[in-house]
Image (cartoon, rainbow, N blue to C red):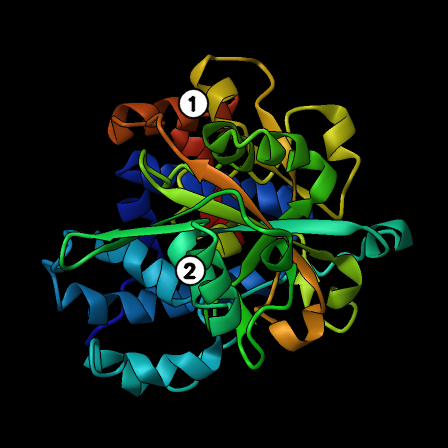
Amino acid sequence: MKPLTKNQLVKRLLATPRGQIFLWNLLDSHDEKLFDLADLPEFFRWWCMALPAVDAKAPLPDGSDPLFVTLDLLRLEPNQWSSLTPAYPGLAALGPKPEFRVLCCRATSRRVHEGMLVTTLDTEGFLTHVGEGVKNNLLATGALDTTSDGSTLRATVGGIPRTARADRLRSGAYLGSPGELVWFTTAGAVENSIRKREADEVRDRLGLVHIEPGEDRVAIKFEASALRSQTTGRPTALDAGSNRRFKARADHSCCRRRTAWGHTVHLADLEDGNDICDGVPERISYPIATDSLGPVEVLPIGRTAIMRANSPPAEDQGFVDRLAQGRDIEFLRQSILALI
């Protein structure tokens, strides 16, 4: 299959608000010096080569755009690349893929390494990380309630007993999907919202625009010292991939001074049209071995009720305008092509 040219790829991205969101964040990531000079040309070279293999399978079963499916596949760990061959045979001819995750490994202060961090999971995901003893404890105390429609299991966790709130996750597993990333924040940034069981508020502060109403969530609180031997960094546009509500540059100057941390988009503030829509500080890590985490604290967040950005095209265009900050699309096109 013939690769796309970089001009062709950029043209396809500029044709959609979602593509423009990615490109503005890419440009801002570069301006924030989150990339080395060679990172972007190499990434776009691979995107141009891999996209025809995904295009060849279109239309995709879930209606996804091959452009963004390919973008997210390129974010996977290189060892997972060969596993994609059955779904996208054309990828095999491209050979081993470089690592494009966590390209900005800026170190945090020592004080952060001595603190507590938080990541969140859907309840079903959490249950795959705990041993049978903890599950049985949750069931026996009525803290775990599950329902099923025959194909989808829905689980709600509430009133977690102390023995399950502070426990070790199942040995030999990883926090985070294999080959992807763990996104985390400082515990103090969201702890009050979590303890109030304000699921929508937690979702909004973390910028999790893909979380729809009716999803049950839990928070995993762990010691930052677990990351001392881990690859961690500030997220870039490449790490965010097809995320429609990522921004590489914080709005507030005090947030921008924390150069080792990114900042989420506060979804409610964004929807209200506030000038400042910084949520909470965020960093990323390769999946974390549960054996290195030690004791964790599991906190129920509750179930979301409010939809955010339920009309993606219109909402996405508004976010594009916010990221552009008066710069026009021709400036974006020329700037990106100059970088890649």
Q: Where is residue 115? Give x, y as percent.
A: 82, 51
Is residue 244 shown to the viewer in this render? yes
Residue occupied by mark 2: 125
Q: Residue at x 29, y 78 (%)?
A: 84
Is residue 283 shown to the viewer in this render? no
Residue occupied by mark 1: 321
Q: Is residue 95 left or right of residue 24?
A: left
Residue 105 in which image quadrant? bottom right
Q: Is residue 182 above or below residue 11?
A: below
Q: Which mark is residue 147?
A: none
Q: Where is residue 183? Give x, y as percent.
A: 57, 53
**Quarter in which the N terminus is drawn:** bottom left
Q: Residue at x 60, y 45 (%)?
A: 29
Give the amino acid at mark 1: Asp
Q: Is residue 271 above or below residue 204?
A: above
Q: Residue at x 43, y 18 (%)?
A: 271
Choose between 79 and 34: the one closer to the eye: 79
What kind of element bears circle 2? Answer: helix
How packed is label 2: few (under 14 Cα within 10 Å), some, or many (20 or more)?
Answer: some
Give the amino acid at mark 2: Gly
Q: Where is residue 227? Give x, y as percent.
A: 73, 65
